[in-house]
């Protein structure tokens, strides 16, 4: 059913984005990958995904900090595939520090990459989706789009912003067949989280092994990291025709975290 559609997944050279791009490609969706990394590694991952799935897989290096490059990314997808059906706004960064020590440049980067990029990509994609008469926008927010933790002021502000933006644009597009939703994962063991374990240890003055148990999985009642497939399952539902009535939703995949 998704075969022949075209998608962009921002921040798909690592972690969740890479898993989301793979899940879409395996359903027959042409995909534009995006994100940072070593050129040779990105190209070998791109070629491997194309060989495995038989879909067209392209790469664009747009920096989500730069609005004009985000517009270029969207134009690139349309030029390469002649259409754009699915936009997954996934790129994100984290910085953990008490507010009084929080570097202003980090605040600006987190707001730009985690929140403003979602606006810029959506703004570029919506006219294409409107012209096609259908579209699916899925934003990777976080449990931190719904509840907070200390030392993550910029991230929590940005992710709450993503949830609010998702709702507002969903209402604007409610009469069309373009849906806009946010996925709110709990902890997934990606490179972003591995780095946080070290940063949390510093901010909380705690040994690294205790952070995992007392801080990271303390928030997650099922005491397990969220698996990529559990996120991919929701993504595939949202982008399918079966997801047609789900819009403006912030959907938790967090092992019970935000139920507590
Ligand atoms: P990750 O660090 O593994 O991957 C982030 C991706 O974004 C990489 O491909 C990176 O190159 C890319 N990226 C970073 N800055 C960029 C920029 N300026 N321009 C373009 N690409 C850029 O992180 P992840 O854990 O896979 O996180 C993906 C998304 O999921 C993020 O929005 C994150 O906030 C969210 N999230 C993660 C978790 C978790 O536990 N890992 C939980 C909830 C939400």
Image: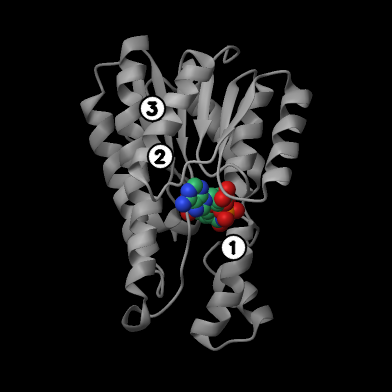
Q: Nearer the viewer, residue 116 or 196?
A: 116
Mark 3 neighbour density, 10 Å: few (under 14) some (14–19) many (20 or more):
some
Badge number at residue 193: 1
Quadrant of the drawing holding the N terminus: top right
Q: Nearer the viewer, residue 16 or 37?
A: 37
Disc 2 Cβ-to-ligand 1 distance below 8 Å? no
Which of the two discs, 1 and 3, sits closer to the camera?
Answer: 1
Q: Earlier in the sequence, mark 2 or mark 1?
A: 2
Q: Nearer the viewer, residue 64 or 256?
A: 64
Residue at 40% over, 52% down: 113
Residue at 66% over, 39% down: 229
Question: In x, y percent, where is residue 184?
Answer: 45, 48
Mark 2 neighbour density, 10 Å: few (under 14) some (14–19) many (20 or more):
some
Residue at 28% over, 30% down: 170
Which structural element holds mark 1? helix
Check the image and report above or below for 139 versus 160. above
**Disc 3 + disc 2, Cβ < 8 Å:** no
Check the image and report above or below for 59 versus 25. below
Q: Nearer the viewer, residue 100 or 103?
A: 103
State the residue position of label 3: 246
State the residue position of label 2: 69
């Amino acid at each position: 059913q998704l075969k022949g559609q075209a998608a962009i997944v921002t921040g798909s050279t690592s972690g969740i984005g890479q898993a989301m791009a793979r899940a879409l490609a395996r359903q027959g969706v042409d995909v534009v990958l995006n994100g940072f990394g070593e050129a040779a590694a990105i190209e070998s991952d791109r070629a491997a995904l194309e060989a495995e799935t038989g879909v067209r897989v392209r790469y664009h290096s747009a920096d989500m900090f730069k609005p004009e490059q985000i517009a270029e990314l969207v134009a690139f997808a349309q030029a390469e595939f002649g259409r754009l059906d699915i936009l997954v706004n996934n790129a994100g960064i984290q910085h953990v520090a008490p507010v009084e020590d929080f570097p202003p440049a980090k605040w600006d980067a987190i707001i730009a990459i985690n929140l403003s990029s979602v606006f810029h990509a959506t703004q570029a994609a919506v006219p294409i989706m409107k012209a096609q008469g259908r579209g699916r926008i899925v934003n990777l927010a976080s449990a931190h789009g719904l509840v907070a933790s200390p030392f993550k002021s910029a991230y929590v502000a940005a992710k709450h912003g993503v949830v609010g933006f998702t709702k507002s644009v969903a209402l604007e597009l409610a009469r069309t067949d373009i849906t806009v939703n946010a996925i709110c994962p709990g902890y997934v063991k990606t490179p972003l989280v591995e780095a946080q374990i070290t940063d949390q240890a510093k901010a909380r003055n705690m040994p690294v092994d205790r952070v995992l148990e007392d801080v990271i999985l303390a928030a997650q009642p099922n005491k397990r990291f969220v698996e990529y497939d559990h996120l991919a399952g929701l993504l595939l539902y949202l982008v399918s025709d079966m997801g047609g009535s789900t819009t403006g939703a912030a959907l938790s995949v967090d092992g019970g975290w935000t139920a507590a």
